[in-house]
Amino acid sequence: MVDFPSIQKRPAYRQVMDALEALARDKAPGERLGTEGDFVKAFGVSLVTVRQALARLEHEGIIERRQGVGTFIPTERLPRRHVAVYLEADPLHASISAYFPKLAHETRRALSALGLSNRCYFGSSSPREVIEGRFTCEDLLVDYRLGRLSGVVAVCVSRVLRELEAYGPVEIPVIDGRFRDRQGWSSKAAFLKFAFGRLRAEGRRRIAVLAWENPNLKFKPFHAELVELAREAGAEIDERLWDLNASALETGMGWERFRDLWRASASKPDGLIVLDDMIFNDCQQAICEMGLSVPEQLTVVLQSSDAQTLRPRFPVHVHQVIASQVAERYAQTMQALIRQEPLPAFEVAHEHLTLCGPEPYLPRTVNLLGTP
């Protein structure tokens, strides 16, 4: 049994880190330090505390953990490594949803709670340039080439994996859109099930949809998913009432597209699904200007997040994504990927709200192009 240095009354995981780091200085490369059980007994702390300390030491390149064997001094000292939390767009750009900067912040906090060193990386492009494939974060690529990254979490639409692949096979875990799609983490699917269920419960069958699907993504076609869920809910399928190209990046797009959908058929919709809170801000303007009564004529269901402050002028059913819950999933999954352990089962929480605007509608002047 190895004689471990004693630890004093200080934050537990930090005590263990300092003690093991001091011990590691006197050890030769490749030498074994011990097991998690050894450290628990030696320091009189919990297994959770030991694992938190070991995770941080491993990311600093001071130790190397081998599953089922123990903790060793690396044969080659690695540079300090960290998880990159990446947002491809400029977080201060006027047209970016508040959800993504909040998700980046929450992801960093969740990673830190697990003892995983991390750093934020931001692009300098607008959301539109991101969609068009522009990559503007050279810092991330530099740190990747220097071996400083232990993983990447891309919290928004991203081509980061393609950029990394330009340097050869990617040997660090990357959580991006492709990964999320393979794992079945679609928040859209969860929302659509809620939306069609809510509309069916209120007797609504003729459903209009305003959404935006990035044409550059090669995931499961959203259109096919929408058709499948509409059929399951017993809704009429009239694609004249579906607009899946209503980009939230265009000011006034929701206003214009809703008016187009309403005029598309003599038989008017009695339900409306909106998959973006930024589209909704424009859309509700059109609903008010057209004098429609909500919810008497039209039931509205919206996907939003807890990062967005909504000010509806009529009752709206909201399926709200909780950013901190999504961040917890990212952090726990990244930890498992780094350790090469099975991915944890995790259910992201959603909050179902019915919001009603307290403020009366005040008409605004619109121009001939249909932009408020």
Image (spheres, rainbow, N blue to C red):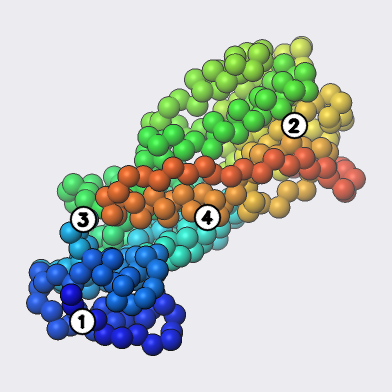
- Give the distance between the C-alpha atoms of the residues marked 4 and 2, in whole angstroms: 26 Å
Could you classify mark 1 by the number of other residues whose Cα lies within 10 Å: few (under 14), some (14-19), or many (20 or more)? Answer: few
Kindly identify the residue that appears in the image at 23 percent across and 66 percent down. 35
Q: Amino acid at mark 3?
A: Gly
What residue is disc 4 on?
103
Q: Secondary structure at mark 1?
A: loop
Query: Which label sits on residue 3?
Result: 1
- For the N terminus, the image quarter is bottom left
Quarter holding residue 239: top right
- Give the distance between the C-alpha atoms of the residues marked 4 and 1, in whole angstroms: 44 Å
Kindly identify the residue that appears in the image at 66 percent across and 29 percent down. 195
What residue is disc 3 on?
68
Answer with left or right where residue 238 lies relative to residue 355: left
Answer with left or right where residue 235 lies relative to residue 82: right
Counting residues from the start of the chain, the first of labels 3 and 1 encountered is 1
Q: Amino acid at mark 4?
A: Leu
Counting residues from the start of the chain, the first of labels 4 and 2 encountered is 4
Query: 220 or 40, which lies in front?
Result: 40
Query: 49 or 279, which lies in front?
Result: 49
Query: Which label sits on residue 133?
Result: none
Q: Position of residue 256 (x, y in %)?
A: 69, 32
Q: Position of residue 115 (x, y in %)?
A: 39, 66
Of marks 3 and 2, the one in the foreground? 3
Q: Secondary structure at mark 2?
A: strand
Could you classify mark 4 by the number of other residues whose Cα lies within 10 Å: few (under 14), some (14-19), or many (20 or more)? Answer: many
